[in-house]
Amino acid sequence: MPLPRPLTDALQIEKGVLYVVAMPIGHDADITLRALKVLSTVDIIAAEDTRLAARKLSQYQIASRLVSCHEYNEAGRAAGLVQKLQAGAAIALISDAGTPSVSDPGYRLIQSAIGAGVKVVPIPGVSAAIAALSVSGLPTDAFTFLGFPPRKQTHRVALLQEMACEPRTLIFYESPKRVLQFIEDAIAILGTRQAVLSREMTKSHEEFIRGTLSEIRDTLSARPEVKGECTLLISGKKRDATELSEAAASVVTEAAAHSEESTGDLARTLSLQYGISRKKAYQMILSQKSGKTPPSSV
C-alpha cells in the first residue's frame, strides 16, 4: 500500500528500538500511516498469532519477518528478542487486535526491554476501551479500566465488590460466552446501573446496546447466542446527599492542608479521590482559599 511521501519521508525508523504498534480491532482501514511505515521497515515483527498477522499485513502489502510472541511463550521469547534489539535490530510488537499489552500479550517483552535499557516507542492507534467509551454516553472525564474479569465466579464477585463504590465509569472486556453471567453478577453486586455493551466494534455487525444492566441482560438473553468480543461499560456509583456533603467537607479540609498546590492540580486530584466533579472541587478550593463559605451542594 503506497503511503503519502510528504508524511512518510519524515518518519525515520531507529535501529535497536522496540516499537509497540496498535493494530485495527476490526476495520482494516483503522491503521495509522506511521504504523504502516514502521511495520514495513522494521527487521522483525513480534506477533501474537503469526498466521493471523501474515494475513492482515498482506492487505497492506507488508511481508516483514514474523516471530511469535504470545501468552504462552512470551517469557521465554523476550530474552532472545531483547538480545536482537541490543544488537541493533528494529522490532515491532503487535497483538491480534488493538494495542499490545493492554489485556493482550506484550507486557513481559516491554518490561524486559526497558530493564535492558532498550528504547521503547509507542505507535498509538485503536483501543477497544477508548473507542467504546467515546460513544458510550457515560461520563468520560474519569474511568477505571479493568480488562477481562476473572473466570472464576468467586474471584469475579470479589472484584465487583471491590468496585461497588467506585464513582468512575467502569470498563471491562468479556468473551461472548461469559458476558451474560458477568452481567448477572454485576446486577447482583452493583444493582441498577446505566451501562453500554459494545459488540463487534468497527465490523459489519457493530452494535451498541444501551440501558440498565438488567435491560442489556434481557436483550442478550432473548438471542440464541451472543457473538463477537464485548466491551462492557458501567456507570460509577452515584453518591447520596450525605456522602456528597461528607466529600465536600473532606475537599475543603484537604485544600487547607495543601494550600501551596495549584488550584487546578488539587481540584483534579480531590475530585477523583472524593468522587465529585472537578468543577465543584475547584469552586470549593477557591472558596476555602479566599476565606469564604464553600457551596454546600456538590
Image (tube, grey):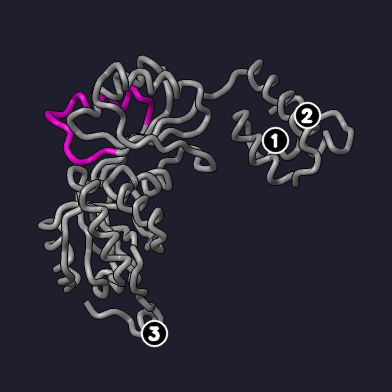
N-term-proximal mark, 1 vs 3: 3
Q: Amino acid at mark 3?
A: Pro
Q: On the image, numbered disc 1 is attached to which residue?
A: 280
Q: On the image, numbered disc 2 is attached to which residue?
A: 295
- Using the rendered image of the protein, determine whether residue 121 is visible from the camera's viewpoint: no
Callout 1–callout 2 Cβ contact below 8 Å: yes
Q: On the image, numbered disc 3 is attached to which residue?
A: 6
Q: Residue at x 37, y 49 (%)?
A: 131
Mark 1 to mark 2: distance in Å? 9 Å
3 or 2: mark nearer the eye: 3
Along the viewing direction, whichever of 112 and 195 lies nearer the viewer: 112
> Left of 58 or right of it: where is 11?
right
Q: Amino acid at mark 1?
A: Lys
Along the viewing direction, whichever of 72 and 253 lies nearer the viewer: 72
Q: Secondary structure at mark 2?
A: loop
Callout 2: few (<14), some (14-19), or many (20+) C-alpha neighbours within 10 Å?
few
Q: Amino acid at mark 2?
A: Pro
Quadrant location of the N terminus in the rendered image: bottom left
Q: Secondary structure at mark 3?
A: helix
Q: Magenta span covers which residues?
A: 211-230
**Magenta highlight on residue 179:** no
Callout 3: few (<14), some (14-19), or many (20+) C-alpha neighbours within 10 Å?
few
Mark 3 to mark 2: distance in Å? 54 Å
